[in-house]
């Protein structure tokens, strides 16, 4: 069970989570297992229904991921009762749920760009 405080997905709150430099970015899609990318001590850890994958992360990849997350935060929609997919950005102190206007907003493309899937 997580003790993280639920916060609104604002730029300020997301930046608080990023500042920890130890956070997880999850993708939840109805009918599928959760996928996540965690960032710890300059390492990226990808978890899915496949074996866990861990490797060093480059500065360019950090910028790419930051841009991706900022785009989905900007596309967050409020007042959605049910959604087939959503994102969670969290660390030990805070967690924010983001509901994108587009169902998965190219999450698979991000995974391919990072060479986490084929």
Image (spheres, rainbow, N blue to C red):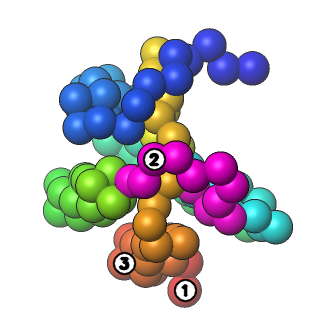
- Observer-side mark, 2 or 1, equals 2
- The residue at the point 57 percent across, 52 percent down is 80
Of the image marks 2 and 1, the number of the one nearer the N terminus = 2
Residue 115 visible, this orientation: no
Range shown magenta: 76-86
- The residue at the point 47 percent across, 34 percent down is 96
**Local crowd at mark 1 within 10 Å, few (<14), some, or many (≥20)?**
few
**Contact? badges 2 and 1 (CB < 8 Å):** no
**Contact? badges 1 and 3 (CB < 8 Å):** no
Q: Using the rendered view, name the quadrant where residue 58 is placed.
A: bottom left
**x and y, in percent, of residue 63 in the image:** 18, 57
**x and y, in percent, of residue 91 in the image:** 47, 26
CA–CA distance between discs 3 and 2? 29 Å
Of the image marks 1 and 3, the number of the one nearer the N terminus = 3
Give the residue pinned by disc 3. Answer: 113
Secondary structure beneath dot 3 equals helix
Up-down relation of residue 14 to residue 3 (above or below) = below
Secondary structure beneath dot 1 equals loop
Secondary structure beneath dot 2 equals loop
**Local crowd at mark 3 within 10 Å, few (<14), some, or many (≥20)?**
few
Is-magenta flag for residue 80? Answer: yes
- The residue at the point 33 percent across, 51 percent down is 73
- Observer-side mark, 3 or 2, equals 2
User: In this rendering, would 6 be left or right of 82?
Assistant: left
Of the image marks 3 and 2, the number of the one nearer the N terminus = 2
**Local crowd at mark 2 within 10 Å, few (<14), some, or many (≥20)?**
few
Give the residue pinned by disc 2. Answer: 78
74, 117: nearer the viewer: 74
Up-down relation of residue 24 to residue 54 (above or below) = above
**x and y, in percent, of residue 92 in the image:** 51, 19
Give the residue pinned by disc 1. Answer: 118
């Amino acid at each position: 069970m997580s003790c993280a405080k639920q916060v609104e997905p604002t730029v300020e709150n997301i930046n608080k989570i990023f500042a920890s430099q130890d956070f997880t970015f999850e993708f939840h899609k109805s009918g599928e297992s959760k996928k996540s990318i965690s960032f710890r001590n300059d390492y990226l850890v990808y978890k899915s229904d496949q074996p866990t994958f861990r490797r060093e992360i480059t500065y360019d990849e950090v910028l790419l991921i930051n841009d991706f997350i900022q785009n989905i935060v900007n596309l967050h929609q409020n007042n959605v009762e049910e959604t087939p997919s959503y994102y969670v950005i969290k660390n030990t102190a805070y967690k924010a749920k983001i509901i994108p206007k587009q169902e998965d907003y190219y999450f698979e493309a991000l995974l391919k760009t990072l060479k986490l899937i084929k």
